[in-house]
Amino acid sequence: MATRVLSSPKLLKNLRSFIKPLNSAASSSVAVVSPLNFDHKPDLSGVEKQHPTTTTTPLDFDDHQKLFASVSTLKLLRSSANLGLASNETFVDFGMWVMNSRLVETPLLRDAILKTVKQTFFEHFCADETPAEAAECLREIQEAGLRGMLVYAVEHTSDNAGCDRNLEGFLQSVEFAKSLPPSSVSSVVAKITAICPLGLLRRISDLLRWQYKDPSFSLPWKLNTLPIFTDSSALYHTLLKPDPLTPQEESNLHLAHQRLLQLCQKCAHYDVPLIIDAEDTSIQPAIDYFTYSSAIMYNKHDPIIYGTIQAYLKDARERLFNAAKTAESLGIPMGFKLVRGAYMSSETKLASSLGFDSPVHNGIQHTHACFNDCASFMLDKVADGYGGLVLATHNLESGQLAASKARDVGIQKGNKKLEFAQLYGMSEALSYGLRNAGFQVSKYLPYGPVDMVMPYLLRRAEENRGLLSSSSLDRLLMGKELKRRLKRLQFAKSGMTAPASGMKIETGAP
Ligand SMILES: Cc1cc2nc3c(=O)[nH]c(=O)nc-3n(C[C@H](O)[C@H](O)[C@H](O)COP(=O)(O)OP(=O)(O)OC[C@H]3O[C@@H](n4cnc5c(N)ncnc54)[C@H](O)[C@@H]3O)c2cc1C
């Protein structure tokens, strides 16, 4: 018999204690961080009325049995143990120190370290090493009613030969996605740093920045694009007028464009959306330039190419608005993935070393408000039939606000233009809660050799460290569900009947 555990006041209190520190000022801060004078300012009234954790939210996190119904006990145990490890600051600090030390250069030690990483963090946060091995993971995800965003996890390449190899990996990823049922893969993800040498991306970003400062500065190689900067964008990376591209650089740029176009062509041909990740602000102008110029060529009826906006940046709201508005006026259905951003410490460190303010919002509440504003703006667009939106977040309140708003503006649950997404191995509760409420949900699923995925894993380690990290709610709910299953097992062994539906069988916080 099903043992539905009714939401005890204690569980609700626990949930709120996780939500509050992250979001306590979300509704009020919307006003604080909306100094921009947009022509069509996103209408947030609907969002603010739908304050989370009220009865109006379509998401239900109280019933952990229902949330984790599709997850095996073994998987729950492993996930819980791995997230517990990731939240242990001493363990993570030590692991990061080892990974950044010269110890990894000693072959024997390196093998031992990679093996340990493979059996813990890699297994938890990644699909596996090859597409064929990732298939098993995708099957599990599909059985759980979710889809996968397939990510061949290469990044930061310095030469053309490496970029060519990476392109092959991405093309293989699209072929693989096409070979699977459409209900299992929602998109393929790529990083521009894997197909264009990093030094060239810096040069192009410099040149684009300079042209923004001085519109008479000519860039003969420049293709049509959407707006990349606003007056609040960080321009301090380029303090001196850059030299024009050399013939060799122009030729490398041409090669990089050809790589991206080959990838876009395949995605368009197979109707598999391509999502371009955002990286750090020193190279993001070039990434946006590549993304928008290819979207102009390939986004015909529906968005095939999606860019990414990082809401932790002070110029994010205005940039999204300008790009979406221009694309709409040109009749280009643009897709955006919205994230908070994963390079906060390096952004702040670089800006301060150059004597400038960080490009990241001064407080987390501003980031939350910016994310929710951007989400609200794009949800209105999707409701009007324009563009596509991938809401990539682990934040419960942002998930709830967006789910409520999607319902209020009448976006149908099966609408392919709206997708929620979480990283594989993170925020299972939010993924399952959104799925149970009928939304389309994807897991961002990186695959590749362990040493290649290491930069991604280090960012996840950083994100999950500490007791109040993104994974804290998952750990709480998984712990409760594991306790419930253990109790059931004990009842079964002792020959007693399991408690009736609605009876409280919890024994307190894990
Ligand atoms: C599907 C998917 C795709 C992603 N793709 C990208 C990508 O392309 N590029 C990218 O950069 N990231 C990407 N990310 C990572 C994402 O940016 C991080 O997971 C993000 O930090 C977590 O934010 P959240 O929305 O889950 O919110 P929360 O769980 O609420 O996270 C909040 C975090 O934001 C940080 N933060 C942001 N602004 C501030 C501030 N002003 N002050 C203090 N702390 C702040 C803090 O570290 C805090 O831990 C992706 C994530 C997902 C789920």
Image (spheres, rainbow, N blue to C red):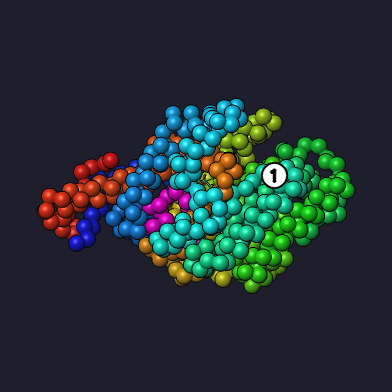
Q: Residues within 10 Å of mark 1 (few under 14, many from 20)?
A: some
Image position of 110 with respect to 182: above or below: above
- Image location (x, y in percent) of residue 483: 25, 46
- Image location (x, y in percent) of residue 243: 86, 42
- The span shown in magenta is 417-433
Residue 278 visible: no
Image position of 83 with respect to 106: above or below: below
Residue 396 visible: yes
Figure quadrant of residue 272: bottom right
- Image location (x, y in percent) of residue 81: 37, 41
Furthest-bottom residue in this view: 301
In this orientation, which residue lies closer to the viewer: 121 or 271? Answer: 121
Residue at 34% of width from left, 46% of height from top? 77
Q: Amino acid at mark 1?
A: Thr
Image position of 328 with respect to 346: above or below: below
For mark 1, give the secondary structure: loop
| Residue with the mark numbered 1 | 157
**Horizontal arrangement in the rendering, residue 392 relative to residue 189 (left or right):** left
Furthest-front residue in this view: 108
